[in-house]
Amino acid sequence: MDHLEHSNGHPRHLHEHSDVSVRAIGMFLAALLTGMVVVYVGLLGLWRFLGTVVPQEPSTTALSGPRELPPAPRLQVKAEEELEIYREKERQRISTYGWVDRTAGTVHMPIEKAMDMVLQRGMPVRKEAPAAAKK
């Protein structure tokens, strides 16, 4: 039942009279406007202050000075070509003989030959158990 008969015969609609406070909305808008003005004035003052404190020097661009390479690691310009060169060097290394450390007598050999030698001689075995395993 949302209406009642008024004394003059017209329907009387019932509704809440305290839904919206116009005064509260006005106070909120006034506070919002005041806050905006305070922020604007503060930023304007800060802008002027920093404009006088920080000297305006002519800016230099990256192209104006000598060209220097950035520190490593740098981006690869031709990654596919560099990867192919690296793979070719590694293929060469695992398919030929050569010195790793001449003073220590360490060499590298073709991988197939190294695998055959492991099959013939077997894997190296420790002669003594580690100190932690003895306890």
Image: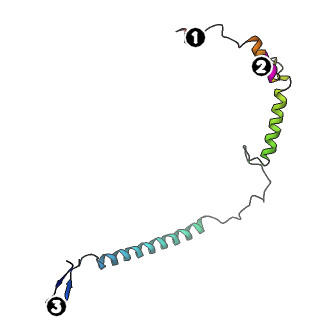
- Which numbered marker is on residue 9? 3
Residue 115 part of the magenta-drawn span: yes
Specify the amino acid type for callout 1.
Answer: Ala
What x and y, as percent, mark residue 37? 45, 75
For label 2, the SS is helix
Which quadrant holds residue 89? top right
Q: Is residue 13 above or below residue 58?
A: below
Which of pointers 1 and 3 lies earlier in the amino acid sequence?
Answer: 3
Answer whether labels 1 and 3 touch (C-beta < 8 Å).
no
Which of pointers 1 and 2 lies earlier in the amino acid sequence?
Answer: 2
Q: How many marks?
A: 3
For label 1, the SS is helix
The residue that mark 1 highlights is 131
What x and y, as percent, mark residue 86? 80, 37
Which quadrant holds residue 14? bottom left
Residue at screen point 85% across, 30% down: 92
Local crowd size for mark 2, using a 10 Å CA cut-off: few (<14), some (14–19), many (≥20): few
The residue that mark 2 highlights is 115
Q: Magenta residues?
A: 111-116
| Left or right for 53, reference 103 | left
Residue located farthest toward the bottom when viewing the structure as drawn? 8
- Which numbered marker is on residue 70? none
Specify the amino acid type for callout 2.
Answer: Met
Which of the two residues, 122 or 130, is positioned nearer the viewer here? 122
Residue at screen point 33% across, 76% down: 25
| Real-space Cα separation, disc 1 to disc 2, in angstroms | 31 Å
Q: Is residue 1 above or below residue 108?
A: below
Q: Is residue 36 above or below residue 117?
A: below
Residue 29 part of the magenta-drawn span: no
For label 3, the SS is loop
Q: Is residue 29 above or below residue 86?
A: below
